[in-house]
Amino acid sequence: MTMNFIKKVIKKIKEGLLQEMYVEAKWMYQYIKRYKFAVAFYLILGVISTLMGLGGSVLSKYLIDAVTGVDKSNIATIVVGIISMAIGGIIINAINSRISTKISIKVNNEITQEVYDKVMRSDWLSMTNFHSGDILNRLNTDVSTVSSSVIGWIPSLITKTVQFIGALAIILYYDPTMALLALISAPIMLTVSKILIKKMRYFNKKTREVSSDLMAFNEESFQNIQSIKAFDLINSFNDKLINMQNKYKEVSLDFNKFSIATSSFMSLVGMIVSYSCFGWGVYRLWTGHITYGTMTLFLQLSGTLSSSFNSLVGMVPSAISATTSAGRLMDFFDLPNEELLDDKKVQHIYNKTKDKGLTVELDNVMFNYDENKVVFENASIIANPGEIVALVGPSGEGKTTMVRVLLALIKIKKGKAVIRDINNMECNISADSRKFFAYVPQGNTIFSGTIADNMRMVKEDATDEEIIEALKTACAYDFVKQLPEGINSIVGEKGTGFSEGQSQRLSIARALLRRSPILILDEATSALDVYTERLVLKNIMDMGYARTCIVTTHRPSVLNLCDRVYKIDKSSVSEIDHQEVEQLIKDF
């Protein structure tokens, strides 16, 4: 009968309003299972501590009865028992605190690692739907909420249930009427909680969303502080911050108002129950039906009963908060992963033939971000080892999109995109084939740390000599060697302290240090003067390494160094001849 009832409850949860919370709680349960032994030990200690607390209350009754003359025997034994239980409770609580902290940190780190890994491996286009500020908020706030609930929620639910049942059983033993009075609030609080679940979930979601918006705004502001200052937009951005803060304040105060109203109602019900129990106890004591010790026991246990029940009801908001956070994290796990194609072929080429040069070929490729605009159609490009191939064309016509195709950040809709070795073995371009590429994007990609740290990101075991050689090839060592610490000089966030041109040369040096067979320079020399730009490209191709170099550029100054030039314009990709290249250079 009991099992059938439980099955019916679970079925109702799955089919009803709580379905979403059920799915989210089930997702959280996987982490509880991983630490089931530690959680079980924590739970056992919690139950023991609860039973010791109840035992202490019972012993207090006998102690008071003893000192008031009802039963003077065993006073010393009772005192020793009370002290032992109190000290035992302190020890158990200390152990529990240590265990819960350890598990919470482990779970927090584990979920953070899994979410971080999932974000990094998810399909790039899918991830663009999330603002980086929102991702950070989920990675910090939501992970912390879930990890604390893994160790806190279920064990607390069980220990509070044990406390409630234990207190109720003791009161029932001594006075069933008192137990009935103590339970008056139960149906009221359960009804109220059921009604308010939807509203609590709404407020939790809304608060998280506004918090994410605020974090995203702050992150973007600090990333673009130079532009904000340059356009004299400080006051404007301060006003935007105030508006967002007001929105956050409005949502938070609405939630607070709702919380105050519900908690005040619960407190009022609890107060009525407490006074009812107190009045009944006084009456029973006055009529001689109970002793002072029993009266003290009633007062203690009625308070315990009420507080444990309130705690059980109070877990509803905690459960809603935890499942809301779990749902926000599950959004990441619902994203598709990047495709890994031809893994065995990629590994064979990487181990056997990549150092002898690789050809990149796109054949009749089509791509569109949405149905309304085709970025390019029937596009064909080939780049062979030892060649510099340029992609030119107006801004916004697809050069960067083409780079994203080569790096498998986006998937082509049709056509063929492959990498081919000297033995004509082909592998499809996918996330797995990125190991063949070195990439220098348009923007500043220098990380905080030292110059050497930045360089060793792509080759952890690189020697100082290798780093210096790469810097020389990228025409960067001339300014690096003048720094007080040379390659061990500290670099600020986003390359603070270096010019745009210096940062670009450092990024190029880092890409060269990887010694990848295919190098993509996406407007990577835009901040260099023409002489340095040409020198860098010549140095790259003179390294004695079978490298395929693909560059995108708005400036035609290096086009006469290129073996082939492709023009991307109005959804088409076409190779242009020498005369057209010369005309581009002349028109520029």
Image (cartoon, rainbow, N blue to C red):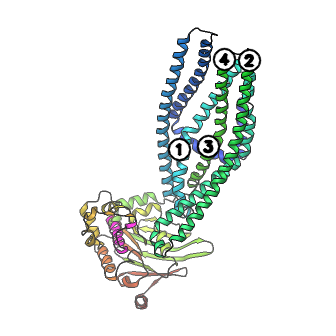
Residue 443 % position (x, y): 43, 71
First in residue order: circle 1 vs circle 2: 1
First in residue order: circle 3 vs circle 4: 4
Q: Which residue is mark 1?
A: 147
Q: Is residue 144 magenta?
A: no
Identify the image quadrant of residue 288: top right
Q: CA distance from mark 2 to mark 4?
A: 10 Å
Q: Which residue is mark 3?
A: 318
Q: CA distance from mark 1 to mark 4?
A: 45 Å
Residues under numbered marks 2 and 4 in contact, where contact means CB atoms less than 8 Å apart: no
Residue 5 % position (x, y): 73, 33
Residue at image coords 49%, 45%: 108
Q: Which residue is mark 2?
A: 286
Q: Which residues are magenta?
A: 494-513
Q: Which residue is mark 4?
A: 292
Residue at image coords 29%, 59%: 462
